[in-house]
């Protein structure tokens, strides 16, 4: 089995490259390495390996956006197994799926490679998008969007204070966020929610950099889970966030959770920010209904 590392220099607030330069000195096996040059590049790199006669262990060296791209590129391929080394900001991929903690762990894996077959989330709004950990709309997606656009972020990253800007925008967004109405169809059953802060669809339990928000999610059960946080004051929302790490958030009546094979979601009165695996994408369109489901293309992740 060949090994390819894919390094995203933009991950971890621009620190992934520095981490890679130290990390690659610890590797005692042959490997190839490619540095991504633009968003979406990792999908192209990994897709091109699908034609290879060799089998590959493809290891992402970045965060959740990088792992999403690698997984999409590897979906459906029998000769590709996905691994990861956390070098991003949130790194939820490595919490929900197995990942490598260091070079010797990769070395051990290569001596007797094992993998498992996993689900991939998919949503369609005319265009098809895929996600590996979660995709959602609302408060958290708006934070992703404003942080990405921020000029202050670039400046603070340079002086090593990138996390500060995130915290600042959480508070700002909390003050100015406009709650929205949400209409859902869960395997055909209709549900309406008012005053929604966010709704997130999960393939795995972790979200937002270590919050175990969807404790019942399993990565290979052919189902997606949905969390809707609604009808809650700003102050109580902060309290709920404080309980996510222990799992106690599921006891609040304002936190609704469901499992379904197919989820249809519409925001008929508001255009709302969206994310896939923590990366902001275009806002919802008032006229559209988005369909979420598990993709038919499965993928393989390492087992240690
Ligand atoms: N050379 C590049 N320049 C700019 N963006 C890139 C480049 N290569 C990849 N990207 C994009 O950078 C985005 C962010 O990377 P990633 O999500 O891996 O890191 P992160 O945001 O620090 O981590 P996390 O998502 O775990 O918080 C990815 O979605 C990817 O498309």
Image: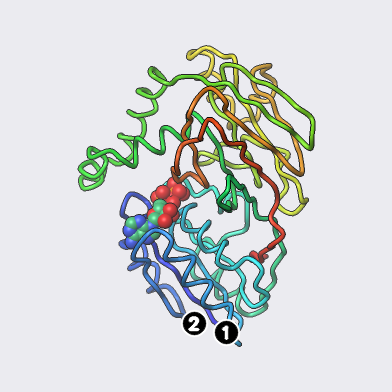
Labels 2 & 1 near each other (Cβ < 8 A): no
* Quarter of the image where ligand 1 sits: bottom left
- The quarter of the picture where the C terminus appears is bottom right
Q: Quadrant of residue 288?
A: top right
Direction from residue 71 to residue 203 in the image, left or right: right
Element at label 2: loop
Query: Which of 161 and 143 lies nearest the eye of the viewer?
Result: 143
Direction from residue 48 to residue 201 in the image, left or right: right
Element at label 1: loop
Residue 1: x and y in percent read 60, 82
Q: Which mark is residue 198?
A: none
List the residue tagged with mark 2: 29
Which-is-in-front pick, marks 2 and 1? 1
Residue 218 in the image: above or below residue 235 = below
Residue 66: x and y in percent read 46, 58
Residue 196: x and y in percent read 57, 21
Direction from residue 156 to residue 62 in the image, left or right: right
Distance from mark 2 CB to nearest ligand 1 atom below 8 Å: no
Q: Would you say residue 134 is visible in this rendering?
A: yes
List the residue tagged with mark 1: 52
Crowding around mark 1 (Cα neighbors within 10 Å: few <14, some 14 to 19, many 20+) is few
Name the residue: 57% across, 28% down: 267
Query: Which of 225 and 206 lies nearest the eye of the viewer?
Result: 225
Name the residue: 59% across, 68% down: 74
């Amino acid at each position: 089995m060949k090994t390819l590392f894919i390094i995203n220099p933009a991950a971890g607030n621009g620190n992934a490259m520095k981490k890679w330069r130290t990390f690659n000195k610890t590797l005692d096996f042959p490997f190839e390495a490619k540095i991504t040059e633009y968003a979406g590049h990792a999908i192209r790199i990994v897709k091109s390996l699908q034609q290879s006669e060799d089998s590959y262990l493809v290891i992402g060296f970045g965060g959740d956006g990088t792992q999403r791209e690698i997984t999409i590129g590897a979906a459906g391929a029998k000769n590709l197994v996905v691994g990861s080394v956390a070098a991003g900001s949130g790194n939820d991929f490595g919490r929900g799926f197995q990942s490598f903690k260091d070079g010797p762990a990769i070395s051990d894996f290569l001596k007797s490679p094992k993998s498992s077959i996993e689900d991939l989330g998919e949503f369609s709004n005319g265009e098809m998008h895929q996600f590996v950990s979660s995709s959602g709309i609302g408060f958290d997606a708006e934070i992703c969007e404003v942080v990405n656009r921020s000029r202050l972020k670039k400046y603070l990253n340079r002086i090593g204070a990138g996390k500060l800007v995130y915290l600042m925008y959480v508070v700002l967004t909390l003050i100015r966020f406009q709650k929205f109405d949400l209409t859902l169809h869960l395997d055909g059953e209709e549900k309406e929610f008012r005053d929604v802060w966010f709704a997130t669809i999960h393939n795995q339990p972790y979200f937002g950099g270590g919050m175990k928000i969807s404790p019942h999610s399993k990565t290979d059960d052919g189902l997606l889970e949905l969390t809707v946080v609604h009808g809650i004051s700003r102050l109580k929302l902060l309290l709920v966030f404080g309980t996510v790490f222990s799992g106690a958030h599921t006891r609040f009546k304002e936190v609704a959770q469901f499992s379904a094979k197919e989820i249809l979601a519409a925001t008929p009165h508001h255009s709302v920010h969206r994310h896939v695996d923590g990366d902001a994408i275009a806002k919802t369109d008032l006229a559209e209904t988005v369909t979420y489901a598990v993709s038919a293309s499965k993928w393989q992740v390492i087992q240690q």
